[in-house]
Amino acid sequence: MGEEPKTLPRSASELDDAKNSARSRHDRFRCLFLLSFETIILSHTMKSLLLAFALSRSSSRFLLGPYRLRAFSSSTIITTTTTTSTAMSATTKALVVDPFCFRQFAENEASSSYGGTTFKTTIADFEEVVNRHYDESMLKEGYAPFCKHVFIANDFTDAVVNVLPISPENEGLLRSKYDARNDKELPVLARFFPKEAVSDHLPVARYLDLILYSRDQINKENAAQSQAKNAETAPWGIVSIKAQDVDYELPMNPITAMRNALGKDEGGSGIPIDRKAYQQAVDYWADHAVIS
């Protein structure tokens, strides 16, 4: 009466066949599940990659990368890692033009009365170029621990050399005057060639000598002259730029060494005169003069 009962396997062979059939169905289900799961993960990963690419193309203020993928077996998932940094950390400058050196750039009003080398390029563009070329290994020792030099090829400005040898033909052009670089300094006697008298025959300089002061020294000198503290934090400030034909430091002008020895209150650095270095400077500058 009622529904006929299902027939049970009657032999060991039939029982094995039933088990294999069930195992096969289970394996197919497991494979389908894993494929679906990995498809979801891959889809999420591709979306993340596309988002990273779009952000990196649309905004120069962020650098997304490196974007790394690691593939595992079917029992694991694909993992992604990203490293994101803001433009502030990515573009941190090691070298900045110090306000004392602004007079060497045409965009600053003080450049019109400055007699030394001036640049038509903007301060921002100059900083961008020198920082792109800069490496810490390029630092050369200066006259004091806080002073360094960096020499770079002058392939991006039209600055001409700023020193000429004195000869019988041009010595009659030499002039002298008492000069102070700013209103905080004591004027000192300086000798120079007037720029208008020699500028027609000056070659473009092969190198630029970037004279650097440490951030700590700049802050000390500013404080000694009652100047407001500069909020800049770059480790090196460019305090002067010399256009020249050699990639090494020219001797410091003897009058500059004397000014430094006067101390920070008078516009110097406070470094006493080194007699040997001073005499080497005299030997060089006895036969050379700056163009101003």
Image: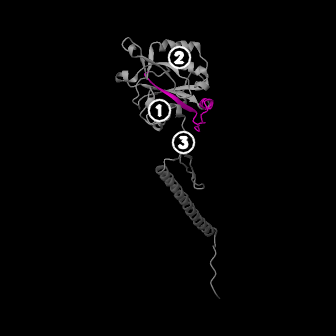
Q: What residue type is disc 1 on?
A: Ala
Give residue 239's position: percent from left, percent from top: 53, 29
| Viewer-nearest of discs 3 and 1 | 1
| Viewer-nearest of discs 3 and 2 | 2
Residue drawn at point x = 38 percent, y = 14 percent: 172
In three-dimensional space, the C-alpha distance between marks 3 and 1, rounded to whole angstroms, equals 32 Å
Highlighted range, magenta: 217-245
Residue drawn at point x = 53 percent, y = 44 percent: 87
On screen, 265 above or below 77?
above
What residue is disc 3 on?
A: 90
Judged from the image, the secondary structure of the residue bearing numbered disc 1 is helix
Q: Earlier in the sequence, mark 3 or mark 1?
A: 3
Q: Is residue 11 magenta?
A: no
On screen, 35 above or below 246?
below
Circle 1 Cα neighbour tier, 10 Å, few/some/many (<14 / 14–19 / ≥20): few
Q: Earlier in the sequence, mark 1 or mark 2?
A: 1
For residue 98, say whether it is visible: no
What residue is disc 1 on?
A: 110
For this rendering, which residue is in front, 80 or 75?
Answer: 80
Judged from the image, the secondary structure of the residue bearing numbered disc 2 is helix
For this rendering, which residue is in front, 89 or 72?
Answer: 89
Q: Are marks 1 and 2 in contact (CB under 8 Å)?
A: no
Which residue is at the far left?
200
Q: What residue type is disc 3 on?
A: Ala
What residue is disc 2 on?
A: 254
